[in-house]
Image (tube, helix red, strand yellow):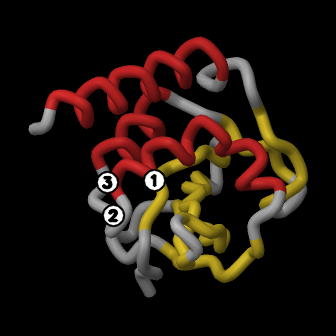
Amino acid sequence: MDESIKNIRKNVLLYAKRNLIAIVRVGGIVENKFIEFTSTGIKEAINQPHKHYILKCLAILDIEFKIRNAEYVCFVEDTTGRCLGFHYLKTQIANEDSYIVIKHNFNESVVFYTIVDALKT
């Protein structure tokens, strides 16, 4: 992996640990529940492939704004029988549609999960 990409990944994760995880909760976007940030979700977002990978990673630095200004698209239930599903919120990365994925554990929490460049239905 290119050294500059490693540095971006490292800096985004460091930013998230200091500014998002266990600190920030974005309220009212998904079924009037708070969206929480976890290290698992941030790492998933950093590792997720994307057409504009570096810009997607940098979008995490502004994820609160992106979530608040995203367009709600749909909810997809988990197909493995677990009691959870995924909310998709449309945003823009490099002037193209991307989707913020919010994992909704029905019995527990609503957490930021990742950012993808295509809907999974």
Q: Which mark is residue 56?
A: 1
How many neighbours does mark 3 have within 10 angstroms: few (below 14), some (14-19), or many (20 or more)?
Answer: some
**Residue at (16% x, 28% y) in the render:** 3
How many neighbours does mark 2 have within 10 angstroms: few (below 14), some (14-19), or many (20 or more)?
Answer: some
Q: Most extreme residue toward the bottom, as rendered?
A: 121
Tell me the distance, in whole angstroms, between the alpha carbons under discs 1 and 2. Answer: 7 Å
Q: Give residue 22's position: percent from left, percent from top.
A: 65, 19
Tell me the distance, in whole angstroms, between the alpha carbons under discs 3 and 1. Answer: 9 Å
Tell me the distance, in whole angstroms, between the alpha carbons under discs 2 and 3. Answer: 6 Å
Q: Give residue 36's position: percent from left, percent from top.
A: 67, 36
- Amino acid type at circle 1 is Lys
Could you say which quadrant of the image residue 64 lies in?
top right
Label pair 1/2, CB-CB below 8 angstroms: yes
Q: Give residue 31's position: percent from left, percent from top.
A: 83, 63
Q: Nearer the viewer, residue 55 or 110?
A: 55
Placement of 38 over or under 57, stated as above or below:
above
Label pair 3/1, CB-CB below 8 angstroms: yes
Query: Which residue is under mark 3?
Result: 48
Could you say which quadrant of the image residue 52 lies in?
bottom left
Q: Which mark is residue 50?
A: 2
- Amino acid type at circle 2 is His
**Residue at (46% x, 40% y) in the render:** 41
